[in-house]
Image (cartoon, grey):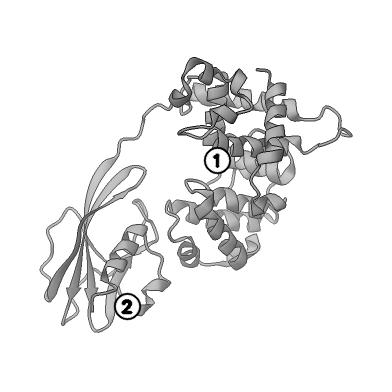
């Protein structure tokens, strides 16, 4: 199928089926950038509320840059992949130091945590630059329609898909500045994302009502479920964690996780890992055992305990004591949210 036919078919589909999302009603690069960062590894249904809360709390990039990392992490709590929040905060300070939001794909790419896709998406959606933004949805659509079996997470695959996507974007670009619909490249990137998210889905795509069904190589060859191809590179490792929530006269002890491991900057109660349980005086109550929590590179199996202590136990210096009712002021990982939920009914 020619890039020209592909792009025009997708734009016609998008005109009828495109999703109405709030960040599509603005060309503000800050609002668009925020949406792109939040929606990495996050479904729109979940991310929408976070985007709205961030925009209400930090309506400008200057507001976000002026916030503390703890406040940003707290607002981010529940989204996971917390490095995104830390990078978002650092990038906001980069932008403020620069004096303006960068306006080319190359300059946007220099922001902390911004990769090729995000830079291209912001350049296209905020500034109308005719550059292809390729995410998982786009890989899937192109792989199926054109029958591409090159793994998408290889250098050769990335190059092949990028070149094809650029041809499609260029085919949608008006040849003359005075032509109608100069924002077609901007719309095409959105159309590709939406088509992959709602029509050409990972499982059970709606091939019967697909406007590209007649030209789709994967459908013709019976390979819809096999494409795109991704080479397996990540081996998940298992970690055993024991958490002890210490309760002493209405207070509890927590510490902030350091750099170089999961959940950097987040708070947690007493953690025991790869070590015997210390001798803690008090009543130790088992809460939950072998709670499974899956991360991209790790499978965590956690045991939760509650220690009712008559005396403050001796803890490492990085632990602080806080009133139990104040724990909501501290950003914690999802796994610790589960622990906290398990003790709310225990006096």
Give me the residue at 34% from left, 63% from top.
Answer: 337
Instruction: Give the camera-side residue of 118 and 11.
Output: 11
> Which residue is outermost to the front?
208
Residue 186 point in image, percent of width and height: 71, 39
305 to 21, vertically: above or below: below
Residue at image mark 2: 324
Instruction: Give the camera-side residue of 343 and 271.
Output: 343
Say whether residue 18 is left or right of residue 306. right
- Within 10 Å of disc 2 (Cα), the crowding (few <14, some 14-19, many 20+) is some
Residue 143 point in image, percent of width and height: 53, 24
Secondary-structure class at tag 1: loop
Give the mark toward the camera: 2 or 1.
2
Q: Earlier in the sequence, mark 2 or mark 1?
A: 1
Residue 263: image quadrant is bottom left
Residue at image mark 1: 115
> Which residue is outermost to the top?
221
Residue 306 point in image, percent of width and height: 20, 70
Residue 170 point in image, percent of width and height: 72, 27
State which quarter of the image contains the C terminus. bottom left
């Amino acid at each position: 199928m020619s890039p020209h036919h592909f792009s025009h078919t997708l734009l016609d589909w998008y005109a009828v089926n495109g999703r109405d999302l709030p960040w599509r009603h603005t060309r503000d690069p800050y609002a668009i950038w925020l949406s792109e960062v939040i929606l990495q590894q996050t479904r729109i249904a979940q991310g929408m509320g976070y985007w709205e809360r961030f925009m209400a709390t930090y309506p400008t990039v200057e507001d976000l840059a002026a916030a503390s990392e703890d406040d940003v992490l707290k607002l981010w709590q529940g989204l996971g992949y917390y490095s995104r929040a830390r990078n978002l905060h650092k990038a906001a300070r980069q932008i403020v130091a620069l004096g303006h939001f960068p306006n080319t794909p190359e300059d946007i790419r220099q922001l902390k945590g911004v990769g090729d896709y995000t830079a291209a998406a912001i350049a296209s959606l905020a500034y109308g630059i005719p550059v292809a933004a390729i995410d998982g949805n786009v890989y899937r659509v192109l792989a199926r329609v054109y029958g591409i079996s090159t793994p998408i997470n290889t250098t050769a695959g990335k190059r092949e898909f990028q070149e094809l996507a650029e041809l499609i974007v260029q085919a949608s670009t008006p040849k003359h500045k005075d032509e109608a619909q100069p924002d077609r490249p901007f719309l095409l990137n959105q159309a590709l994302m939406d088509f992959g998210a709602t029509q050409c889905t990972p499982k059970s795509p709606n091939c019967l009502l697909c406007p590209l069904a007649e030209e789709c190589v994967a459908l013709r060859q019976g390979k819809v479920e096999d494409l795109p191809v991704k080479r397996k590179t990540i081996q998940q490792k298992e970690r055993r964690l024991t958490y002890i929530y210490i309760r002493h006269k209405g207070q509890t002890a927590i510490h902030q996780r350091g750099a170089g491991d999961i959940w950097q900057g987040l708070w947690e109660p007493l953690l025991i890992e790869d070590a015997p349980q210390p001798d803690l005086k008090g009543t130790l109550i088992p809460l939950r055992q072998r709670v499974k929590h899956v991360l991209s590179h790790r499978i965590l199996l956690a045991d939760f305990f509650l220690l009712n202590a008559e005396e403050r136990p001796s803890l490492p210096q990085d632990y602080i004591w806080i009133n139990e009712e104040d724990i909501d002021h501290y950003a914690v990982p999802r796994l610790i949210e589960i622990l906290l939920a398990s003790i709310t009914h225990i006096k």
